[in-house]
Image (cartoon, helix red, strand yellow):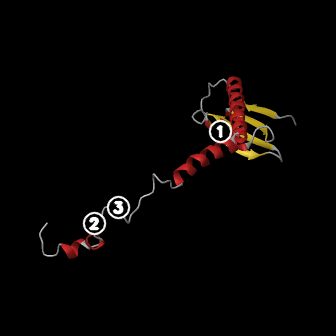
Amino acid sequence: MNNSKINIVKEENLIELYLDERIYNLVVIKKALFNYIEDCYYMLDHFDENIILVKIYLKDQNTNIDEYIKKLYNELFNESLRYDIMIQTKNIRELILGRALYTTCIDTDENTVDYDNNDKNHDINEIAVNWFDKNRGQEC
C-alpha cells in the first residue's frame, strides 16, 4: 500500500483516510485533525500494522471534500515538520532550561542571608507565641 489511500462516501459525508504511521506519526495526525475539530467528527483506528484509519464525518453537507482533503494534507505536513523540529531541538531546549534553572538554584555571596547576624531586635520567644495565649482577656 502506498503512503495513503482515500475513500469517500458522499451519502454519509464521510472521508476515510488510510495514513501510513511511518510517515505521519499518531501525534502528528491528532494535532492536524484538532485544527479542524469544529468542522468534523473523527474516529481513529488501526487498519493494519502501520496504517491508521481516520474516519472523518463532515458536519456541513456543503463542504468541498476535495478542498478539505488538500487542506488536511497541508496541515499533516505542517504538523509533521513541527514534530521533526521538536525532536531535533529537544536537547538544546533541555540545556537552555537546565541552565536557566541552575543559575537560580546556586547560592552566591550576594544571595546568602546570615540569619545569626540579621536584625537582633527580634526575640524568638516573642515571635513564637500563640496569639490566643498572648491576648487572653483582651477585646479585639
Q: Split into 4 quadrants, where in the image is the N terminus?
A: top right
Q: In the rendered structure, which disc, 1 or 2, sits on the residue that comes first in sequence?
A: 1
Image location of residue 82, percent across then percent down: 68, 35
Q: Split into 4 quadrants, where in the image is the C terminus?
A: bottom left
Crowding at dot 2, Cα within 10 Å, few <14 / some 14-19 / many 20+, comes out as few
The residue nearer to you, when weighing 45 against 120, is: 120
The residue nearer to you, when weighing 134 against 26, is: 134
Image location of residue 89, percent across then percent down: 69, 40
Quick one: SS at disc 3?
loop
Quick one: SS at disc 1?
helix
Q: Quadrant of residue 72?
A: top right
Residue type beneath disc 1 = Lys
Q: Tell me the residue at 65%/39% (across/down).
A: 31
Q: Which residue is the site of mark 1?
A: 31
Look at discs 1 and 2 and give the one toward the viewer: 2
Q: Which residue is the site of mark 2?
A: 122
* Left-right relation of 136 to 46: left
Q: Quadrant of residue 57?
A: top right
Quick one: SS at disc 2?
loop
Image location of residue 87, percent across then percent down: 72, 41
Q: Tell me the residue at 57%/51% (across/down).
A: 102
The residue nearer to you, when weighing 44 against 106, is: 106
Residue 113 against residue 30 in the figure, above or below = below
Residue type beneath disc 3 = Asn
Q: Quadrant of residue 66?
A: top right
Proximity of marks 1 and 2: CB atoms separated by less than 8 Å: no
Look at discs 3 and 2 and give the one toward the viewer: 3
Q: In the rendered structure, which disc, 3 or 1, sits on the residue that comes first in sequence?
A: 1
Q: Which residue is the site of mark 3?
A: 118
